[in-house]
Amino acid sequence: MGFIVLKGITKSFNDGSGSRKVLDSLDLSLDKGDFVAVTGVSGAGKTTLLNILGSLLTPDQGSYIIDGIDVLAPGTDLLRLRNRRIGFVFQDHRLLPQFTVMQNILLPALADSDSVESAVTEWARQLVRIMGIEDLTAQLPDTLSGGEKSRVAICRALIMKPDLLLADEPTGQLDAGHAREVAELLARVNRELGTTIVLVTHSDTLAHSASRIYQLKEGKLS
Ligand SMILES: Nc1ncnc2c1ncn2[C@@H]1O[C@H](COP(=O)(O)OP(=O)(O)O)[C@@H](O)[C@H]1O
Ligand SMILES: [Mg+2]
């Protein structure tokens, strides 16, 4: 059985004139260490799919298993699951403006315990080096460029060494050169940490850094 198994996932939204099925009996199965890209036109449901994978949104129908854990079962501790096993890079970064770059990166670790262990601080230092933002750690997010914010968001998503990294168009606001850099960093994270990655992107170039490419169309992956 796969590490991640989505089966028969259906999700509809009410758009005012009625209910629209965004995901229609969608299936997806990923093994540990897979790196897949999801492409699709705007409005195809890519963010909806990532939100369901991130346990931020509940589907109307279907089942979702991560590593044997039934994500949709009533008793499942979603806060713990999200914080320890899933890293999320949001389309709009969602960095907290009042905290420095380093504080933003360490937040998931702080949410998990009262103090941050030195091993975590060391991992954060390593991450900022890998991402090339070691000189920016004392700055506030508002002083950063879009590309730098993306890299901070990726560091934050990786601080807990999640099994699953979900990235929603992380390079959407970047120029081609920086976008390629972020794609290379994700590929490196996948290779060196064995992190399972689902990358949503418009860009064919970026999608090709993944080992499998899916297209989301009419509520299904193909
Ligand atoms: N919370 C919501 N309420 C109503 N409609 C929504 C909601 N979230 C998404 N949608 C609709 O679902 C469709 C898919 O959205 P989304 O998953 O954001 O697509 P994508 O990320 O591929 O651009 C769009 O038509 C969008 O308007
Ligand atoms: Mg989207």
Image (spheres, grey):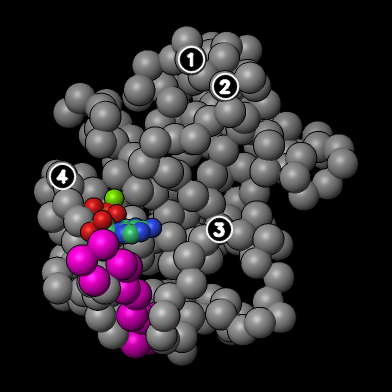
Mark 1 lies on a secondary structure that is: helix
Sequence-wise first label, 3 or 1: 3
Sequence-wise first label, 2 or 4: 2
For the point 86% across and 38% down, the residue is 115
Q: Are marks 1 and 2 in contact (CB under 8 Å)?
A: yes
| Residue linked to disc 2 | 97
Q: Tell me if mark 1 has few (under 14), some (14-19) or many (20+) residues whose alpha carbon lies within 10 angstroms of its own.
A: some
Q: Identify the magenta region.
A: 6-18
| Residue linked to disc 4 | 203
Sequence-wise first label, 4 or 3: 3
Q: Tell me if mark 3 has few (under 14), some (14-19) or many (20+) residues whose alpha carbon lies within 10 angstroms of its own.
A: many
The amino acid beneath tag 2 is Pro
The amino acid beneath tag 4 is Ser
The x, y position of residue 55, in whole percent, is 53, 66
| Residue linked to disc 1 | 142
Q: Are marks 4 and 3 in contact (CB under 8 Å)?
A: no
Sequence-wise first label, 1 or 2: 2
Separation (CA) of disc 1 from disc 2: 7 Å
Separation (CA) of disc 3 from disc 1: 26 Å
Q: Is residue 154 above or below residue 17?
A: above
Separation (CA) of disc 3 from disc 2: 23 Å
